[in-house]
Image: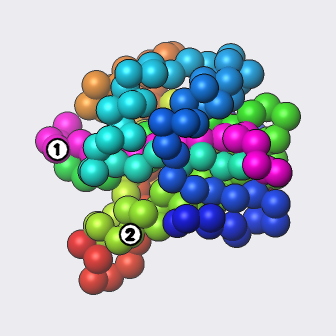
Amino acid sequence: MPGQDDRPGVRVRPATQDDLDAVADVERRARRGTDRDQLVLALTDPERVVVVATVDGVVVGWGKTHWWSYEDGPAPVGHYLGGVTVDPDFRRGGVGGTLTRARMDWVAGRAGFVCCVVNATNVASLALHEGLGFREVARAASFHTIRFTGGSGVLLRADLGAGRA
Ligand SMILES: CC(C)(COP(=O)(O)OP(=O)(O)OC[C@H]1O[C@@H](n2cnc3c(N)ncnc32)[C@H](O)[C@@H]1OP(=O)(O)O)[C@@H](O)C(=O)NCCC(=O)NCCS
């Protein structure tokens, strides 16, 4: 993972506390928001990873994973990709894909599959994840503690190869 680079110019590395302001800036530019305290918890949780993508040393996107320790209907216990945001000025340049592959690689070292949940209206995120091997498992108004704006979310799952479960 350190310095992972599978798209020219885009580097992905584990995030540190020093990246918190840059992550907040990406969220602001994307007109989203993330809870700084929750992010600090994720950074220090060995069951999770937080990554940032940089271009010319500047943070242009970030993503994290989440570990769900209980199932919720069709949503299993396991590692989930827990959100990814790319600066609007850097979209469609492979940043989101690179952040997602890096987190899939991190999970692949620990488990045989990974899940994520996406709002059913989020065409970009669904296409991004399906392009990386995720397949739809179920739809619902909520999975675990996540309730979807508009009323429908998609549970996706990708198998990460034999012998890693
Ligand atoms: C979803 C998001 C992370 C994608 O980031 P990105 O850097 O633009 O993604 P990439 O350039 O790596 O795109 C990879 C693939 O995703 C799909 N994709 C990305 N944006 C898309 C869009 N607007 N419409 C349709 N497909 C899209 C395409 O298949 C694309 O491959 P291609 O460019 O070869 O066609 C970005 O749009 C974003 O930050 N959105 C707001 C936050 C969000 O919705 N996050 C997901 C929460 S689950």
Q: Which residue is mark 2?
A: 108
For label 2, count other residues whose C-alpha is less than 10 Å away and answer few (under 14), some (14-19) or many (20+): many
Q: Is residue 64 magenta?
A: yes
Q: Position of residue 120 (x, y in %)?
A: 53, 32
Q: Amino acid at mark 2?
A: Ala
For label 1, count other residues whose C-alpha is less than 10 Å away and answer few (under 14), some (14-19) or many (20+): few
Q: Which residue lies most toward the bottom here?
A: 163
Q: Position of residue 36 (x, y in %)?
A: 45, 21
Contact between marks 1 and 2 (CB within 8 A): the answer is: no
Q: Which comes sooner in the sequence, label 1 or label 2?
A: 1
Q: Is residue 77 left or right of residue 42?
A: left
The secondary element bearing badge 1 is classed as: loop
Q: Name which quarter of the figure residue 38 lies in.
A: top left
Taking the image in four quarters, ligand 1 sits in the one at top right
Q: Is residue 4 visible?
A: yes
Q: Is residue 120 left or right of residue 107?
A: right
The label on residue 69 is 1
Up/down of 132 relative to 60, above or below: below
The magenta span reads 55-74
Query: Residue drawn 44% across and 19% down?
Result: 35
The secondary element bearing badge 2 is classed as: helix
Closest to the observer, 122 or 59? 59
Q: Is residue 96 magenta?
A: no
